[in-house]
């Protein structure tokens, strides 16, 4: 199911072209052997087929009839859309996406069995089509209550809040399923940073509004965040005390306010992200 050798291999693809961006890659990705002699690959931004030469891509673009990821558009707000792609119904797309994503994911192993996964593709849409900004994958059935396997924001779109939006979306799916979830481990440094930020923001917002005592279990039920993740987050915020063999949340309003200030801007929901991008001139 998983390939472990790839960690030790040397990166050969140095750049990719995707839509209107040329992107420098970060890590090795195990493309099929016939691509071993390439340092640059040209991706169709819609079906994610990749080619060795620009002319091949140009020919492809004339006949490729996709203008958005395959699968169902399950969410839209302003110019942002989310598509759900079933790896079983769109095998080649799922594989292409995994090859692409591995270029930016270090610790993650590549899944060849895309059948078992759903892919959630976040796009910015305009009159030319829906352009992928990032995605996450999710196992259809996870024994370990994982609600997200891999997450990526493409480098040109990073640090705009899309990572946190994708994370928020993964928890919204868990809420709809009536389950708690957690991301697959290990997390990368950037992954951990993003999750810590999300968990902190969500939990502080609830603690700020909530009157009276609240338990970790209750927080977990409200947020679909796994109890262990709530505990480590609140511990790092020094909002947990250990009394009579139990972890107790001590939400001192002053401490909360200090953390809330430090946590800074929100922007967990898509409408806020949209507004922020519009006002900062990002199209
Ligand atoms: N340096 C410092 N802080 C950063 C950086 C950076 N380069 N990038 C993001 N952050 C911080 C942001 O400031 C923000 O912090 P806040 O919560 O205090 O506001 C937080 O991380 C999230 O920022 P977003 O803009 O929402 O996230 P982004 O769209 O950049 O995506 C992601 C985050 C998906 C982790 C992205 O960095 C990425 O794709 N990295 C490469 C792939 C990767 O490592 N994925 C995670 C692997 S673990 C897993 O898949 C389960
Ligand atoms: Zn195509």
Image (cartoon, rainbow, N blue to C red):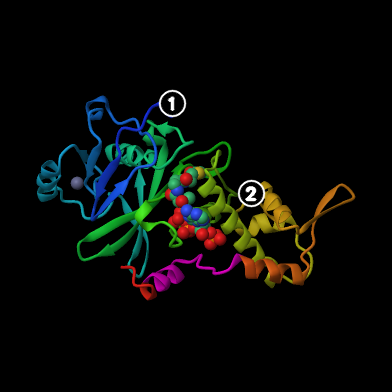
Vertical placement of residue 264 versus 50, above or below: below
Q: Secondary structure at mark 2?
A: loop
Q: Nearer the viewer, residue 267 or 55?
A: 55
Quarter of the image with the N terminus is top left
Position in image of residue 103 (x %, y %): 36, 40
Q: Which mark is residue 115?
A: none
**Classed neighbour count for the residue bearing mark 1: other residues with Cα under 10 Å, few (<14), some (14–19), many (≥20):** few
Residue at 28% across, 57% down: 131
In this picture, residue 189 sits left or right of residue 26 = right
The residue that disc 2 covers is: 226
Vertical placement of residue 275 versus 147, above or below: below
Q: Does the magenta segment cover residue 269? A: yes
In this picture, residue 268 sits left or right of residue 219 = left
Residue at 61% across, 62% down: 202
The residue that disc 1 covers is: 8
Quarter of the image with the C terminus is bottom left
Residue interval drawn in magenta: 263-277
Q: Secondary structure at mark 1?
A: helix
Q: Does the magenta segment cover residue 238? A: no
């Amino acid at each position: 199911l998983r390939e472990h050798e790839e960690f030790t291999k040397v990166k050969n693809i140095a750049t990719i072209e995707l839509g209107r961006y040329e992107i420098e890659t970060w890590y090795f990705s195990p493309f099929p052997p016939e691509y071993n002699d390439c340092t640059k690959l040209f991706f169709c931004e819609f079906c994610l087929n990749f080619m060795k030469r620009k002319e091949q891509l140009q020919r492809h673009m004339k006949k490729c009839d996709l203008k958005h990821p395959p699968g169902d558009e399950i969410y839209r707000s302003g110019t942002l859309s989310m598509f759900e792609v079933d790896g079983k119904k769109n095998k080649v797309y799922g594989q292409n996406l995994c090859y692409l994503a591995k270029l930016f994911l270090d610790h993650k192993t590549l899944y060849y069995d895309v059948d078992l996964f759903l892919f959630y593709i976040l796009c910015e849409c305009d009159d030319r089509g829906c352009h992928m900004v990032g995605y996450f994958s999710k196992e259809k059935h996870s024994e370990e209550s994982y609600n997200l396997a891999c997450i990526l924001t493409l480098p040109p779109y990073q640090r705009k809040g899309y990572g946190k939006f994708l994370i928020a979306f993964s928890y919204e799916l868990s809420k709809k399923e009536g389950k708690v979830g957690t991301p697959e481990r290990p997390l990368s440094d950037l992954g951990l940073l993003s999750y810590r930020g999300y968990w902190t923001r969500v939990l502080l917002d609830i603690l700020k509004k909530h009157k009276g005592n609240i338990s970790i279990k209750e927080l977990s039920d409200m947020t679909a965040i796994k109890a262990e993740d709530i505990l480590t987050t609140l511990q790092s915020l020094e909002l947990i005390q250990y009394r009579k063999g139990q972890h107790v949340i001590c939400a001192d309003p002053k401490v909360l306010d200090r953390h809330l200030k430090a946590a800074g801007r929100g922007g967990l929901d898509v409408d806020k992200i949209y507004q922020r991008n519009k006002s900062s001139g990002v199209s």
